[in-house]
Image (cartoon, rainbow, N blue to C red):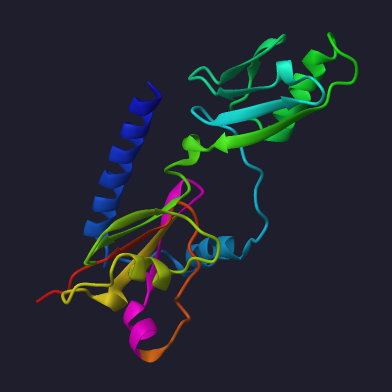
Amino acid sequence: MARTYRCIGLLFSVFAAALLAGCAGGPASSPEKIQRALAMSEDTETPAYILGITDVVSVSVWRNSDLSASVPIRPDGMISVPLVGDVRAAGRTPEALADSIEDRLSAYIREPQVSIVVTSMDSHEFTDRVRITGAVRSPQSIPHRDGMTALDILLSAGGATEFAALNDAMLYREMDDEMVAIPVKLADILNKGDIKTNYTMRPGDILAIPERNF
């Protein structure tokens, strides 16, 4: 079932990227929305990781190795922990999950100390990606990296084709359940060294490059 969910997510991502590529070159969002969306890139605070279905966590109980286990988060959002049984994991931070297990274990052992290590982050496989579509040599969906810019993702796609309208590129960013269209002047970045629109990418961003109208 988890594999089915991932396939559906991949198909939806590809469809959305293709749709946005067709819209590239369309109208940009309002200046106010663009400024708000760009301000999201300047937020350097890393949000707490929220556990999700298909993630795998390693549960370690200090001085009780027989209670430690590496377990996947099931489709119902639960994990099975020795002695205490099922514990809800999805939707919690690793720290909150550790606190919950400690509370349950305290009925059996004295002052339990639990640590949680996320060993697989499958639930974020698609939400933590950035994508580039349109007139590029190799459209890409790649994991987001801190500091990644619009130019970085263009280069990762092998550069633009000879038909690309580089100064008509659009960066699409979700904000408040709305997709904000932000103009990116890739030709100016590449040919003039003007990096004003070489924006920092965020997870979920899509950079779409249209072809020139002949």
Quarter holding residue 134: bottom left
* Residue 181 rendering spot, x and y as whole percentages: 39, 62
* Viewport quadrant of the C terminus: bottom left
Q: Is residue 100 visible?
A: yes
Which one is in front, 155 or 28?
155
What stretch of residues is rendered in magenta? 174-191
Above or below, comparing residue 182 to residue 175 in the picture: below
Residue 59 left/right relative to 154: right
Does the magenta portion include 175?
Answer: yes
Q: Residue drawn 35% across and 71% down?
A: 155
Examine the rendered structure and indicate whether residue 38 appears above or below residue 130.
Answer: below
The quarter of the picture where residue 118 lies is top right
Q: How many numbered discs, if any?
A: 0
Residue farthest to the right?
110
User: Residue 77: x and y, percent?
Assistant: 55, 21
Kindly give the residue lying farthest to the bottom in the view shown: 192
Does 156 sit left or right of 92 as displayed?
left
Q: Is residue 94 left or right of residue 213?
A: right
Q: Residue at x 25, y 51 (%)?
A: 19
Q: Position of residue 95 (x, y in %)?
A: 73, 34
Asked if residue 91 shows in the view, the reply is no
Residue 49 position in % (x across, y down): 62, 41
The N terminus appears in which quarter of the rendering? Answer: top left
Reply yes or no: does residue 196 show up in magenta. Answer: no
Picture layout, residue 155 above or below residue 108 = below
Residue 64 or residue 4, whichever sits in front: 64
Residue at image coords 52%, 38%: 121
